[in-house]
Amino acid sequence: MTPDELETTLRDIGTERYHNRHPFHRMLHGGECSRGQVQAWALNRYYYQAQIPVKDATLLARLPTADLRREWRRRLVDHDGDAPGTGGISRWLKLVESVGLDAAYAESTRGILPATRFAVDAYIAFVRDRSLLEAIASSLTEMFAPKIIGERVAGMLAHYDWITRDALAYFTPRLTQAPQDVAFALGYVREHARTQTEQEAVLAALRFKCDVLWAQLDALHHAYVTPGLIPPGAFVPR
């Protein structure tokens, strides 16, 4: 494929597989979730958010040049912040508190679903063990993030009177951060995925990352919607 054809195919994967199509997300954005279901989502999603800088640090250590490392380390600051109380993880904890949960409980990860832990840990292992090209390509779900952020913020503010715009402050910086991250990662993939084997690996990496996100919502739906089987030790809504 040409670089343009490769990019088109990557975007087609998002159209088919991105988790904005998942029934749980449609419930969440459509105002159909109970407070307990929203709490379960915020709690489990925290583990994913908290591990993103771990993933990025793992990838950063593999980059061979200072220019590439300078580009990637911005992601660490975006999530960890450059001082206590700043960054995406801190903003997500404020969301956790705003829906009625304790931030320390979220940070402990005691109440998350086993499938959440397995999916997120599998993503970190993928970035650690696969080729650098595959690791970078797996981040390209960010191509589709602005769409889901817009749906999420508008839907939750419209349907849950106990959620404020301040509670959703995590998402506002992502509307500019994600496109910036995509510009670099997509450019890298377009330049370095030249052979059929490399391009197939890139496409598989993006499908894998979509599966990681989808699997987390499958677990939430199974535990907190239908059939409602909450695993031992996981968060139980009041």
Image: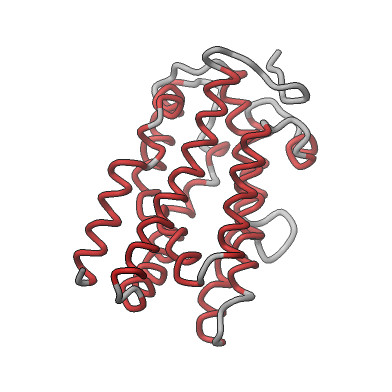
- Residue 128 to residue 221: above or below: below
Left or right: 193 as drawn, with respect to 210 = left
- Residue 38 to residue 143: above or below: above
Q: For residue 77, say whether it is visible.
A: no
Residue at the image position 55 percent from the left and 15 percent from the top: 34
Q: Nearer the viewer, residue 97 or 236?
A: 236
* Quadrant (top left/top right/bottom left/bottom right) for the N terminus: bottom left
Q: For residue 227, say whether it is visible.
A: yes
* Quadrant (top left/top right/bottom left/bottom right) for the C terminus: top right
Rendered image coloring scheme: secondary structure
Q: Quadrant of residue 37?
A: top right
Residue 41, x across and y down, in percent: 58, 30
Q: Nearer the viewer, residue 164 or 37?
A: 37
- How many numbered discs? 0
Left or right: 25 as drawn, with respect to 61 = left
Residue at the image position 34 percent from the left and 73 percent from the top: 193
Residue 58, x across and y down, in percent: 64, 67
Residue 204, x across and y down, in percent: 39, 56
Residue at the image position 55 percent from the left and 12 percent from the top: 227
Residue at the image position 45 percent from the left and 50 percent from the top: 208
Residue 221, x across and y down, in percent: 52, 22
- Residue 213 to residue 78: above or below: above
Q: Nearer the viewer, residue 97 or 187?
A: 187
Left or right: 39 as drawn, with respect to 24 = right
Q: Quadrant of residue 167?
A: top right
Q: Quadrant of residue 188?
A: bottom left
